[in-house]
Each structure stands twice: as C-alpha cells, then as structure tokens.
Amino acid sequence: MEQNEESIKSLNLPIDITMQRQIKSHVYYLEGPSGRFILKKKRKPGPRDSVAAKVLAFLDISFQREIFINRQMAEKSFSFFKAPKLVSSDGRDYMLFEYISGIDASIKDLTKEEIACSLYEFQNSFMNPYASLFDRIVSMGMKPISSLLRGILAIVLFQCGFDYARKALHAVKLSFRRQKPLKQAKLLHKDLRYDENYIISDKNELYLIDFASVVTERRWIMLDLIDVSFDAERLEVDFSLIKEYHQQLAKTQDVNGEVDLKAQVRIALMRKLIYYMHRSKYSNEQKKAFKRFLCETVLDDDSYEKWFCRVAGE
C-alpha cells in the first residue's frame, strides 16, 4: 500500500487526496476536497521482467492512444452515449477521470434502439484514434483480422488441431469474399462486451470506457455490436439487436447495403470464442463449451449456415 501511495504522489496530480483505494491493477479510486476521481496509471515493466517484456512495453503505445482519444472525446458532444471526463493527464503515465456513479445494470437493460444508436454514433464520430504515424503503423497488428489470425495459429492450432485451424482459415477466406471493404472507415472500440467496458450511470446514461484498443476499420464494422449481443456464458446471440443496428445503417444509407451479416457474425464469433478459450476468467468446462461451439458450429460451413438461418430467422 505504501508503495502505491508513493507512486501516486510521484505523479504530482492536480488534486488533494484524502482517500485512495486500488480497484484493480493500475486503477485507483480517489477522493479529495474537490470530488471523486478514477486514476488510471500506465503499466511499467518491473526489474524482474524479461528484456522482451521491456521491449514490448516500450513499443506499446495503447496508453498514449487512450489519452489521445479521451482528449478528443472532451471536445465533442454526443447524443446517445457519454465518456468520463478526462480531468488531467501528463500525456504519458496517467489519466485522471471524473468518477461516474454507476448502478447495478447491464447494457442489455437499455432499449435495443438506444444500444444501436450509441454504437452507431461512436463509430461515426470521425475521431482520429492514432496519436502518431508510429501508432498508426503499430496498430496494423491490432486490426480485428490480425488478432484473429494470431489466435488461429496460436490457440486453435494447438488446442483443436491442424484440421480445425485449416477450417478456421477457410472460414476467414470465405468471409472475406462475402464482405467487401467499405468506402468509409468506422471506429471500432474492439473491447466491448455484454458485461464489460461500459457504465450505466445512476441517471441511466451509457458511458463507454477503456479506449486503448480503438482502431479504424473498413470491413468488419459490426464487431462491437455483435460482441455486445453475444452472451458468452449462454452461447447465445441476441440477433434482434444485430438487426436493429443493421436497420440503423439502412436508415442512414451509410453503407448502401454493403454489410454482409453472415460474414460479420462469423468473424466476430470466431474472434470472441478463440479469445475466451484461453481467458482465465472462465472455468475449464466453459472453455470446453467455447471450443465445442467454435469447432462444431462456427467453423463447419454447413453447421454455421443452419445455425445462422435459425437465429437470424431466415
């Protein structure tokens, strides 16, 4: 605790602190005469970290990107969602946010129209998520398809076998044929889930948080919406929410009917299931269920076709 106190003091925050509590790694709740705040610190490599870990930490500019995006958020006004106000940042090591008093509610407690409009507004906010040219270059490896291919080679190949890895690559290839790149790039949060990275305030307002993974995307623009609609514990997709967002696109004629739902959902499910298969949050039984759904339904062309037609009501 004393070490944390000293590290926070070393940041020279522009507020007086009377109480602090660590919420999770590198995130703190602070109180003082001027109000309540959330402090987010950049993770720095420790003396016991390997040379490779220190190099990766040096190349990781996601924290600077998050600062960059939050500063842009402060200059914009949104109708359907909000972002916590960035009170202070040194542009490098910390971000100090206003504290949002949240309630025990899920994003699913909002209407489908509210969710669809919020994500549509975020995706079309025309912010530049890249803090520098170096950031833009490094971020190519953070694109959804890049992380999916890494997951296939690092997880599917070793946990499911060569045949399923081949099927996964085949599914990616088919999806790319179905979904052509769009003319207008959209913002992707890339780390939204039905149970994480948002706050429902005590005024019933939706706050989006944690913008470290934001990228621009011209092809897989519905991943955020599908991620929110996918209940990992039940292995269910709320397709009515997906259709609501698709109708929002159609109303605005934003992409001229160029979004292929079958390809969008398949890529999103592959990406999420592979991620969940190695996440410590889930039990071994849940991971087996993710693996089974991925291999038996999502990666098999005929099974996926039947599953999609059933849940989409086609």
Image (spheres, rainbow, N blue to C red):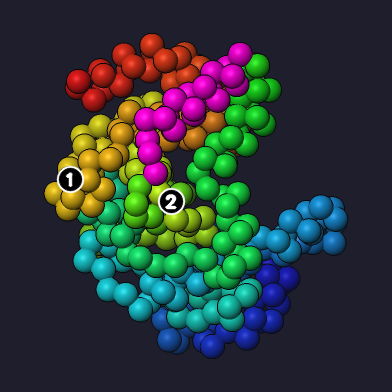
Precedes in sequence: disc 1 or disc 2: 2
Residue 41 locus on image (x, y percent): 61, 68
Secondary structure beneath dot 1 equals helix
Q: Is residue 99 above or below residue 89?
A: above
Secondary structure beneath dot 2 equals strand
Q: Is residue 228 above or below residue 13?
A: above
Overall secondary structure of the magenta stretch? helix
Q: Which residues are magenta?
A: 163-181
Residue at left offset 73%, top offset 71%: 3
Amino acid type of disc 2? Glu
Residue 95 locus on image (x, y percent): 53, 73
What is the number of callouts on the image?
Answer: 2
Residue 222 counted in the magenta span:
no
Residue 264 locus on image (x, y percent): 37, 35
Q: Which residue is mark 1?
A: 250
Q: Is residue 271 above or below residue 142?
A: above
Q: Is residue 159 left or right of residue 54?
A: left
Instruction: Locate the C terminus and report the quarter of the image it occupies.
Output: top left
Residue 7 locus on image (x, y percent): 69, 75
Amino acid type of disc 1? Ala
Task: Give the numbered dot on residue 224.
Answer: none
Q: Which residue is mark 2?
A: 217
- Report, in whole angstroms, how far the alpha carbon at label 1 lies from the one at label 2: 19 Å
